[in-house]
Image (cartoon, helix red, strand yellow):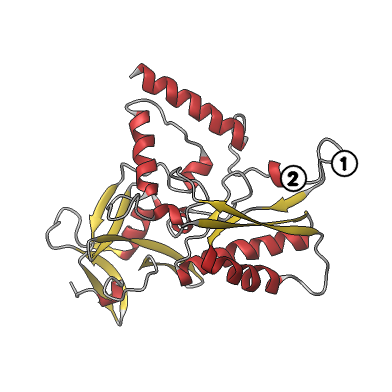
Amino acid sequence: DRKREFIGDIITGLLNVLMGTVIVDKSDITDLSYKVGASGWSDEGMPGKGFEISLPTDLAFTFLQSSILDVLPSSSPIVGYISIRVCPKTETLMGMQQFEKHSIMIEPVGFRTPESLDLFRIIQENLFEFNRRTGAGGMLHWGLENDLVDRWNLEQMAVNRPLRDGSPVTKLFAFKAIKAFIKGEHHPVFDNYFVQRLGLNDYECELREVRATRKVRGNVVGLCNDSEPSWSPVSEEQAILDIQSLRIRYYVNSGGEMVFIQVVNSRRGNYLRTAPNDRDEDNLSNLPDC
């Protein structure tokens, strides 16, 4: 137990130092892109904005053209650059280079202006939508600016794919399990607001399988599982609160695969849906009535 606690103290301290959360509860770091101009400038560098994206070779340049180059503003210039690298696959669980046999690394960096801040927000949102639409699994660099990433976006990335061929365990789940093992019965390990926002601390949450749904005029208003009377049925409003608490996850069994139910924010309010994929049978509206 003391060995676990010691290891936990070391990696928690390392995370706090790297993410700047020793004194303040700050979720993201801008250090690397902020110092992009440190060579030839002052020691502090010049104000910058940037991140790095990892994508598979067959989709990377489509994303580069459609989601970065095509959205560059024509009315006001953006001072910066885009670098492209080719990297072999990583052996780490949460590393960026997750794709066979190589990953294309795209790094857009710009001078920090109101226009560039808006552009980089759009590029991040474009990546999330690209992942949902194509299943690309695009990754973002953990040390650069990831202020828009949350648990739902993380689960669309390549780290949520099987640990190895045929394995029911994903790399993301394995990472959480290792983290929980090191923690043991001690205080949180490798934990701060950044980790919490990405749902990396929810390994021990309760899992609830949904087999049917209640519907009113075609809209899902409740989740059910007749074999689980301790919680079923549950209203949509309560299920949203459960999921947002990080203590309960609802899922649909689709061919042996757990497809998690997500909370979607929209102008008409929050609602539930299964994680986007190419199957129709796990859609909440297509489940049997209850």
Asked which quadrant contains residue 176, the reply is top left
Image quadrant assignment for residue 286: bottom left
Query: Which residue position is annotated with label 1?
Result: 41
Q: Residue at point 60% right, 61% down?
A: 124
- Inspect the image, locate mark 1, and give the three-letter code of the amino acid beneath it: Trp
Judge from the rendering whether residue 38 lies leftward or rightward of residue 3; answer left or right.
Answer: right
Residue 285, horizontal then vertical, whole percent: 29, 76
- Return the x and y of residue 230 as percentages of the image width and height: 16, 53
Report whether 33 appears left or right of 123: right
Look at label 2 and name its amino acid. Answer: Tyr
Number of on-image labels: 2
Choose the circle earlier in sequence order: 2 or 1. 2
Residue 58 in the image: state x and y as whole percent: 52, 68
Quarter occupied by the C terminus = bottom left
Q: CA distance from mark 2 to mark 1?
A: 12 Å
Residue at (68%, 44%) from the top-left corner? 30
Name the residue beneath numbered marker 2. 34
Above or below, 182 against 230 in this view is above
Q: Is residue 43 above or below residue 258?
A: above
Question: Crowding at label 1, few (<14), some or many (≥20) Cα neighbours within 10 Å?
Answer: few
Residue 27 or residue 90, whichever sits in front = 90
